[in-house]
Image (tube, rainbow, N blue to C red):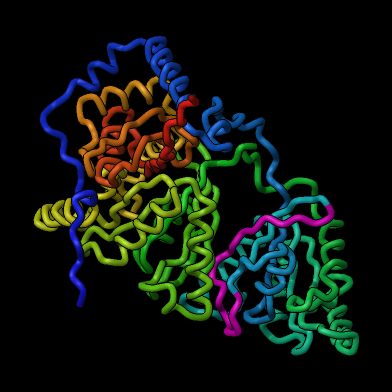
Amino acid sequence: MSETTHRPEDEDYTPAGEDQVAERLAAMTDEEAEARAASLRAGLGDYDLEEDDAALLDDWEDEDGPGADAPAPPVLAVVGRPNVGKSTLVNRIIGRREAVVEDVPGVTRDRVSYEAEWNGRTFTVVDTGGWEHDAKGIHRRVADQAELAVDVADVVLFVVDATVGMTATDEAVVSMLRRKDRPVIVAANKVDDAVQEADAAALWSLGFGHPYPVSGVHGRGVADLLDAVLAELPEESAFGGLVPRGGPRRVALVGRPNVGKSSLLNTLAGSDRVVVDDLAGTTRDPVDELVELGGRLWRFVDTAGIRRRQHMAHGADYYASLRTAAAMDRAEVAVVLLEAPHVISEQDVRIIQLALESGRALVLAYNKWDQVDEERRHQLEKEIDRDLAHVAWAPRVNISALTGWHKDRLVPALDTALESWDRRIPTGKLNAFLGELVAAHPHPLRGGKQPRILFATQASTRPPTFVLFTTGFLDPGYRRFIVRRLRETFGFEGTPIEIGMRIREKRARRR
């Protein structure tokens, strides 16, 4: 067993004594800061810069803000009994493998929304769990979700397995659809060749018009089906209202299985939007939901619980873990749900690390806090200090997903994290801050040399990313010190901060 070599540069930098960086920065005018930065910028002319340095050093501006609100696109709900190939057909319609597919009935449990486009028109496709009229327990709640999807749909796509024909459950779906009084298009799925088209013809008897023979697996007949769907869909949803043009802020609910993510989403939405069951791992697909909270619309994504190791997952669970990572990438802020009554686990720490690696803003929500006694709260504080010290900057919210206790505290925490995630520091202020900080606490000597920071710029936001032009390598411990002081000086509560270096050498003087 090899012994790990301890390197001084890996240690955190500990400043000697106090400083007056904040006071000196506050006393400096914007004009003075800009003048100092301009002088430092001009000094870079003495160094060998690379081609892409010029673009980075140019003035950087925020993107244009969002425009006016837009009508919600029309909604197509895809329904049918279990295992008729709804999710496979949905993947074919949206043109990518998003819906979880496995050769086992009942993989899809919630109603899951995806954006689709055909012939220049955009619409929303809602994949649903298999509808069963005599279902019980979790299967009953899956069926309820399918009915709710029909209630808010403009058109319904009824999927039947043409190779099996109509069953008693299919007949029950037909009865439910007739009660709902929505336009219905029949997709006779699993028709892989012309010989099987006769099986689809038998579905004329349903009274929903022409049954479209399709193959979700091979794509056969899907174009004709989508043409028929567009003919029935209105220009905008009759149930969706207005959606902000820039889009509501996107929030990913993440955490280990059965921690209460779906319960929290249902509580925030004010309805049973997601199937909740004591069985761990009920959610397989990420479930998007527009939720009005604090007087504004938010897009919440309830993700499948992340299991211990992705490589240990298989089948639907494996694809669910991939969907969770993709949902985090689509989100702007991750709310990591932790169970307050239980010890912070290795899984919890790993999930927080995944959120950090995704570069999202971060909020920690402690579920079931109302069930925690004083002794456990004292112990939890110790665990947080020990295991989550690296995210001490993340806002914390104590809530109950089941009862909605303290759910109103979530919005201020989200706002704080997102404002920090979007924050940009003017170049003058940034360089003035670093100049004062380095003057008070210079980088330690390494090999007789002391690297200097020549100039700094904020390359981007979301998350805030800074690039330092230096004369040598800055130790990781010293970079972490700079990040800590950036937070103290400029806020940045709730967002990771990234710092990169560009080491540049002085130009050789011409003789």
Position of 84 relative to 466 (above/below):
below
Q: What residue appears at the point 66 percent right and 31 percent down from the top-left corner?
A: 68
Residue 106 belongs to magenta span: yes
Position of 467 relative to 122 (above/below):
above
Specify start and end residues of the magenta stretch as a single range. Answer: 101-119
Image quadrant in which you'd find residue 108: bottom right
Between 149 and 490, which is closer to the camera in this rendering? 490
Majority secondary structure in the magenta region: loop
Q: What residue appears at the point 38 percent right and 21 percent down from the top-left corner?
A: 429
Q: Is residue 408 visible?
A: no
- x, y percentage for residue 435? 31, 24
Q: How many numbered markers are drawn? A: 0
- x, y percentage for residue 138? 47, 75
Q: In the rendered view, does 9 fall on the left or right side of 81?
A: left
Image quadrant in which you'd find residue 94: bottom right
Q: What residue appears at the point 58 percent right and 37 percent down from the top-left corner?
A: 51
- x, y percentage for residue 366? 28, 53
Q: What residue appears at the point 41 percent right and 30 percent down from the top-left corner?
A: 456
Residue 441 belongs to magenta span: no
Q: Quadrant of the N terminus?
A: bottom left
Between 503 and 146, which is closer to the camera in this rendering? 503
- x, y percentage for residue 216? 75, 76
Q: Is residue 471 visible?
A: yes
Q: In the rendered view, does 116 fall on the left or right side of 56?
A: right
Q: In the rendered view, does 423 fall on the left or right side of 451?
A: right
Question: From this viewpoint, which residue is outermost toward the front?
Answer: 511
Position of 434 relative to 418 (above/below):
above
Between 145 and 29, which is closer to the camera in this rendering? 29
